[in-house]
Image (cartoon, rainbow, N blue to C red):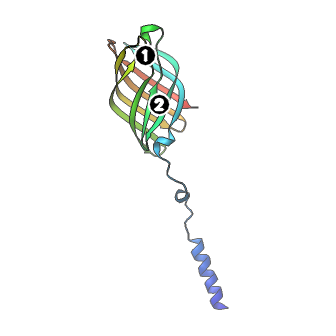
Amino acid sequence: MKFKSLLLVALAFVVSMSSCSKDDDEPKVPVADQVVGSYTGDEVITIAGEPETATATFQFTKAGDAAVDMVIPQSGEGGMMVIPPLTVKNIPLSKVDDTISGVLLSYKGTVTGSDGSEKEFLISDLAVGFQGKVAVVTYTLKYGKMPFDMTTFFNGEKK
């Protein structure tokens, strides 16, 4: 009887010492999967020192477990002043605590302009940040032969 009691106490001790950490049970979700989606909010575009604010939606799609592609929405009004949606590919992401961020110093691409011709664009100093359902994006854009760079700041929420 003493042996059975001792065995029962030892068994209870072993069972009570097992780990039940929630980290052990949760699968690791790739950082890109945590931010993919559409974010709508305020976009401030500054050209030659003149800021213009509009509502915009930025789209993020998965390019890899730790990278996203970003679609910058169309901007401008009427004919030659319209900049079509621009895609920036393979923005590397990292996560520290609850913040996911990415930086891309330079990205060069081409897009079909409103007049049907191919236009080059250069995105520089791109920074993206995500926390919860909020995304913040900043970058500088040189589009086609425009004489001025455009600086953009975007702050939006995931829908």
Q: Amino acid at mark 1?
A: Ile
| Mark 1 or 2: the one toward you | 1
In the visual, does 47 lie left or right of 12? left
Residue ID at (34%, 13%): 148
Instruction: Please name the amino acid that badge 2 sits on.
Output: Val
Q: Residue at x 48, y 10 (%)?
A: 77
Q: What's the distance in space between the residues labelled 1 and 2, CA to CA?
A: 21 Å
In the rendered image, the quadrant that contains the N terminus is bottom right
Q: Determine the residue positioned at 51% across, 42% down.
A: 34
Residue 153 percent coordinates (x, y): 44, 24
Q: Taking 126 as reference, is 74 above or below it?
A: above
Q: x%, y% of residue 39?
A: 53, 30
Label ID, residue 91: none
Count of all numbered marks drawn on residues in the image: 2
Taking depth in this image into account, of 60 and 42 the one nearest to the observer is 60
For the point 48% across and 33% down, the residue is 60
Q: Is residue 127 left or right of residue 35?
A: left
Numbered label attached to residue 83: 1
The answer to whether residue 46 is above or below residue 67 is above
Residue farthest to the front, as pictured: 116
The residue pinned by badge 2 equals 136
Element at label 1: loop
Q: Earlier in the sequence, mark 1 or mark 2?
A: 1
Q: Is residue 64 above or below residue 53?
A: below
